[in-house]
Amino acid sequence: MTFREYTATAKAALRVPRESSPRLVWKFMYNFGWKSMRNISRFEKRQAKGAPFFPAFVMISVTESCNLACSGCWVTEGGRRALTNKQLDSIITSCKKKGSYFFGILGGEPLMYKELLSILEGHPDCYFQLFTNGVLLTDEVARRLKKMGNVTPLISIEGLKEESDARRGKNDVFERTLAGVRACRKAKLIFGVAASICKSNYNDLVNREYIELLAKEGVHYLWYYLYRPVGANPNPDNALDKEQVLAFRRFIVEQRRDAPLFIIETYWDDKGNALCPGATGMSHHISPSGAVEFCPPIQMAIDYVNGEGSNLVELFENSTFLADFRKMTAESSRGCILLEDPQKMVEFLEKHQAIDGTSRGNVLEEYKKMAPSAGHNQEGQEIPEENIFYKLVKKKYFFGFGAYG
């Protein structure tokens, strides 16, 4: 790591305490940083000992409802399924009993879930990453999040002005999302921006100018995803090809040398080997119907939380479906089964008689129509991390946990 790289990483890190409320920084360091490190250690020990399974982190989609209609999104347009307040509260409580205090909160649009902030406010010992399109993230909401102190908004931007409107099915989405970004900055929140990278937004979002723009808007971290063509309007032609995925990985590694914010992804380890968070057991997902799923875009399961939300630990510990899913995906590839071999996934789902947890009810038929797309497992072309900070973090927390032998 050169002096320039060290200085740039230090500057990106120092932006957080300089630009955010001290109380929020403390909450972030303790509720997310310290507790997550302890939780990962517990998870690793459980995996090594063959103890009853429980994921390190749980992602929760609280509602199907959304105020946008994005192509390639797995959320049901017009869907109305949602977890009850009791279920959501009990899910969080159950995870805490297993030492897990960090949650991804998704939708639909989670800010359309009426009692969401009240429930999160009732767990001040936890830390929540709120996946939102930002349109409903007003100054008033941002001020409340500041008062709570235990939420980091992750605002989805799927392209600049024209691409945002085209992808998201509404007008002026980019401007309205930027208003949410600016509300977060005004409230001195710790917050990030996410992007699902596809062919149509690649030139908009995979460049240094975009990273600099976000940093100037006060964004502290940028979370990149690969576009997965799923849902009622999948648009598979928009998925990246093999060469673009490789270029995308190279861009991330290069920008991490001196980016003015942190660049996050969960696809590769420190050596550039692909991995799947679901296959490693690091995280699983709970849908608005209460389905305990392998990951958010794979919307079929056989295990469902009860009306009280009290059986989550039992489901995770005893689910042969999830155990077999982890084994099957890890043995198939280090990458994404949904992208690389959707028909093998379909065979698995049919064999286990998995149930569609969505209100649209035709997810299996959607999967049957999928053709393989380029994934992030590009054996023989691995690009290892160069920045020592990311290299150390990846080596500690993204190494497969024995999933790949």
Image (cartoon, grey):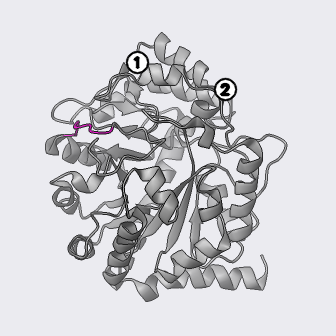
- The amino acid type found where label 1 is placed reads Ala
Q: Is residue 209 left or right of residue 23?
A: right
Can residue 401 be spotted in the picture?
A: no
User: Looking at the image, which is closer to me, 52 or 145?
Assistant: 145
User: Looking at the image, which is closer to me, 247 or 119?
Assistant: 247
Upstream in sequence: badge 2 or badge 1: 2
Q: Which range of residues does the magenta coloring cover?
A: 77-83
- Residue 397: x and y in percent read 59, 54
- Residue 344: x and y in percent read 60, 19
User: Looking at the image, which is closer to me, 201 or 55?
Assistant: 201
Q: Which residue is mark 1?
A: 354
- Residue 349: x and y in percent read 48, 18
Q: Which residue is mark 2?
A: 331
**Callout 1: 10 Å neighbours few (<14), some, many (20+)?**
some
- Residue 110: x and y in percent read 28, 52
Between circles 2 and 1, the one closer to the viewer is 1
